[in-house]
Amino acid sequence: MATMTASDLKQRIADDLASLTALRHDLHACPELGYREHQTSARIQQELTGAGVAFKAGLAGTGVLAHLPATETPRPGAPRGAVALRADIDALPIEEATGKPWASTNPGLMHACGHDGHTTILLGAARALAHVPRPRPVTFIFQPAEEGGAGARAMCEAGALGGEEAGGLGPPVEAIFGLHGWPSVTVGEVATRPGPLLASTDEFHITVRGVGGHAAYPHQARDPIVAAAAVITALQTIASRTVSPVEAVVCTVGRIRGGTANNVIPGEVELDGTTRALTDATRALARQRLFDLAEHTARAHGCEAEVQWHEGYPVTRNDAALTDRFFDVARRALGDDRVRLTPSPTMGGEDFSYYGQRICACFFLLGIVPEGHDPALVPQLHQPDFDFNDDAIPLGIELMCRLALEG
């Protein structure tokens, strides 16, 4: 293979763009929930076969792992292990309201988080990289169930990072890159930061039990609604009085269930919510304080609280050295003015974090806001009118390719 120039790569991507845009629209029209992405997985396998890229299907159920071996001798001092590129493939249980010709054909399901765009970008990168000189092996991870199903963890457990001897393909992976279309970054720009980028995402369910009765005689009951209201208020002290003001933490109660009539005090009330943190220490502290506050506050009101804790995704942390390499590659490709340092983490979560627990990882934000548009006025992630911006596809592919070749 002859040496490929930057202009050669851009031209190859441009020549493939119409086909890839059509692919993205096809994927968008057929959304599937986590671990049920059978049609999506089959389409990925079809595309990889057409591109001549070796793959292994069935990891974590519907996950697909693909691989391209190195074609050149690495430069002295350059990494020799595989570099991985990752995309998530699942959709969300949301009724679509975009009105686009390629809108979801599966009622109640849609690609409201851009995973159709992520999958298209990774397939485009596989197509391009299959025809260029490669100084190191490249592994492509198409993982299921990012939306709450911990598909990344399942792929890791299936050997996606461990190479052929661990159930994967090729040599073990040394570094991994992933991206997310981001509706606060303009198309043509990218952003990230070293260290924490996204928060941990734990969930809780609290049942406050009292003694029901007639609303006219509250002294004969032990009102779990009043106790639950006090619990909700007390939980806000996790952020305001437990954690340092310079540390980020969120504790949100998002759902309350209780009661059957306006003149009946119920026997119990249920609360569902989430806590978010950016360090393991803060995460553990928030968990302990939530149990203490719920149980003792309910008891102070003559009730009892039972807390069920569901551990979610870890903090998504970017390896400092790998992030420096990302910035170097991105700035050479785009120029300094289109590569941004994200000033602070976001309290959203990502299961890309599981890869970062095992190997060096860098996750970056790909701009999808149309030029000249106010980011505050465009549809946001997980909204029924969200649609991935096709104009972001070429840059996403180019950066994934450059990170595999130069990162």
Image (tube, rainbow, N blue to C red):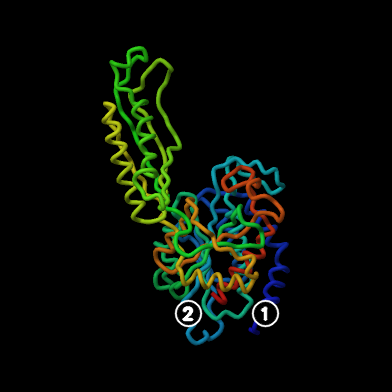
Specify the amino acid type for callout 2.
Pro
97 horizontally vs 224: left or right: right
Q: Identify the residue at horizontal 42%, vertical 60% (top origin).
A: 354
Quick check: marks 1 and 2 in contact, CB under 8 Å?
no
Q: Position of residue 154 (x, y in %)?
A: 42, 58
Residue 8 occupies which quadrant of the picture?
Answer: bottom right
> The C terminus lies in which quarter of the figure?
bottom right
Secondary structure beneath dot 1 equals: loop
Q: Position of residue 26 (x, y in %)?
A: 66, 54
Q: Identify the residue at horizontal 57%, vertical 59% (top origin).
A: 365
Q: Identify the residue at horizontal 36%, vertical 48% (top origin).
A: 243
Label placed on residue 5: 1
Q: Position of residue 152 (x, y in %)?
A: 45, 58
Q: Furthest-top residue in view?
A: 216
Label placed on residue 158: none
Secondary structure beneath dot 2 equals: loop
Query: How far, Cα to Cα, is label 1 from label 2?
Result: 21 Å
Compared to 161, does 221 lie above or below?
above
Compared to 21, does 231 lie above or below?
above
Q: Earlier in the sequence, mark 1 or mark 2?
A: 1
Near-viewer residue (114 or 275): 275
Compared to 81, does 303 lie above or below?
above
Residue 229 occupies which quadrant of the picture?
Answer: top left
Mark 2 surroundings within 10 Å by alpha-carbon count, few (fewer than 14), some (14 through 19), many (20 or more)? some
Q: Position of residue 298 (x, y in %)?
A: 30, 31
Specify the amino acid type for callout 1.
Thr
Q: Identify the residue at horizontal 55%, vertical 70% (top origin).
A: 327
Label placed on residue 79: 2
Near-viewer residue (242 or 150): 242
Q: Furthest-front residue in view?
A: 245
403 horizontally vs 350: left or right: right
Mark 1 surroundings within 10 Å by alpha-carbon count, few (fewer than 14), some (14 through 19), many (20 or more)? few
